Image (cartoon, rainbow, N blue to C red):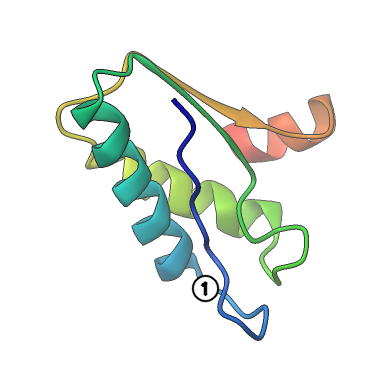
Amino acid sequence: HILHAVAITPSYDSSVELVEAAIRRALEAACALGAKTVTMPALATGFGPLSLEEFAAALGRAAAQDSPPVETLVAVLRGEEEAALVRG
């Protein structure tokens, strides 16, 4: 299944709260479909204004509240440097 999560406004604005809510809704929808693995890009960091650190904060908060949890959550990034930022 492919789920589409939009984490920016029509004017390309965003916030940690908006990204967190989009991730949470996507995780809920994935769980409802029986997904065990979810892969997502760094929402709102391309055309949106968020930094990778802000995306990481939103991802961490949403994943901490994921119930029931998916088994694997993967963030698609541009390399090991970005991955290190997101991992914390």
Q: Residue furthest bottom?
A: 11
Q: Residue at x 82, y 32 (%)?
A: 81
Q: Identify the residue at horizontal 52%, vertical 63% (top origin).
A: 7
Classify mark 1: helix, strand or loop.
loop
Please provide percent x and percent y for residue 38: 45, 25
Identify the residue at image location x=24%, y=18%: 34
Label 1 CA crowd tier, 10 Å (few <14, some 14–19, many 20+): some
The image quarter containing residue 68 is top left
Looking at the picture, how far across and down is residue 24, in whole percent? 32, 48
x and y percentages locating residue 32 in the rendered image: 19, 30
Image check: 74 left or right of 33? right
Placement of 70 over or under 65, stated as above or below:
above
Amino acid at the residue labelled 1: Ser
x, y (%) of residue 10?
60, 82
- Mark yes or no: residue 7 visible: yes
Tell me: 84 left or right of 18: right
42 versus 12 height, above or below: above
Q: Which residue is mark 1?
A: 15
Q: Nearer the viewer, residue 39 or 1?
A: 1
Q: Quadrant of the N terminus?
A: top left
Q: Which one is in front, 50 or 7?
A: 7
